[in-house]
Amino acid sequence: MKITLVKKILADGSPCKKCGDVLQKLEDGGHMSRIDEVLVADERDPESAGLQLAKTLNVHRAPFFVVDREGAEPEVHTVFLKFVKEVLEQEADEGAEAMEILADNPDLDFI
Amino acid sequence: MSAVLLNTVDIDAKLQNEPPQEILRHALEQFDNIALSFSGAEDVVLIDMATQIRPDIEVFCLDTGRLHAETYQFIERVREHYGLNIDLLSPDGNAVRKLVKAKGLYSFYKDNHQECCSIRKITPLKSKLLEVDAWVTGQRKDQSPGTRAAIPVIQDDRLFARPGETLTKFNPLANWTSRQVWDYIRAYDVPYNALHDQGYLSIGCEPCTRPVGPNQHEREGRWWWEEATKKECGLHGSNVRK
């Protein structure tokens, strides 16, 4: 299994806050060693590896994780806590996961 | 790009210009195990359209426990009018109890609406969507004034799919305006929530919904005290005549 993390650099050159938070949580949880590759989606550079991967996988939000398992389609995870639970197989707070989903997907406000 | 993803993107390109009825027809032909999400508001048009294709379409509704009395009455009316078994999903009682005990009944006025909505809506929605292969929403591009991006009419729903499987989400009303929705409701005499006649354009839970005034966007009737709403709907200095 190969895990790739794509983090974002904003158009003004500053790092994306949420990406920083996720990286910190990975460090704090001792999970960084499980991330095989970190790519940067640099909004200043359409050719950046992270943006290219996002385009290929039709992902419009960062950070996101791509999990490649042999013989299977790449899995894309845009919800950090869901990734922690399903891929890293760690316990994650259900309520916090739901809040993360809603924060990242305001269209769900109208369901 | 994976075969599944390429297929969804390709189908979306073809369906973007189709009317909602055709998108629904496609959805119901492709999936047996599909459910339609009903908010108790003007998305009733989807029920009207869908029942003409599949009379026993599965419909679910998120009963947050804080809906208006008119909305509960309307859900019941829709159930009877279309002869449907509407699956009413309630939040986990213990999670609600914990939130109310810690923060009271109106925490969203001080924090924001996300904690309460995540307990009362998102978590039950997550559980429901684990049961289906596809779902239909009444989401429209014009519901958020700041949104310029197109909303797909069909998309691969990675958020709520069962681990290792796919979930397809259909948004047949994505490119319809509120005007088109209401033209349909009136043309076909579709039942609608009585709150709409009291100035409510968008309807959610009672504490977080209010009627809007002339020329106000419907978004201003939801969570109006929050910064995000103010940013989306507020006057921008460059647009104000001095």
Image (tube, coloured by chain):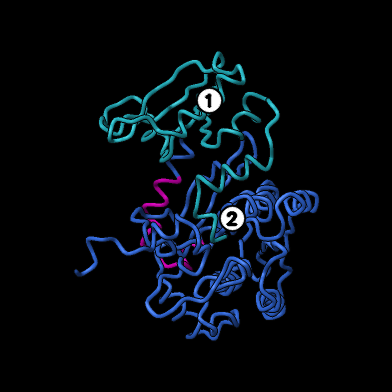
Disc 1 target residue: A67
Rendered-image quadrant of the C terminus of chain B:
bottom left
Q: Chain of mark 2?
A: B
Residue A92 in the image: state x and y as whole percent.
68, 32
Magenta highlight on residue B24: yes
Calculate the distance from the C-alpha at mark 2 to the C-alpha at mark 1. Answer: 38 Å
A93 to B132, vertically: above or below: above
Q: Colour in which chain B is shown?
A: blue
- Is B213 positioned to the left or the right of B102 in the image? left
Q: Residue at left 33%, top 31%?
A: A14
Q: Please state the extent of the stretch shown in magenta in the rendering.
A: B8-25
Rendered-image quadrant of the N terminus of chain B:
top left
Q: Which mark is residue B110?
A: 2
Magenta highlight on residue A89: no
B75 to B170, vertically: above or below: below
Q: Residue at left 53%, top 33%?
A: A77
Q: Is residue B24 visible?
A: no
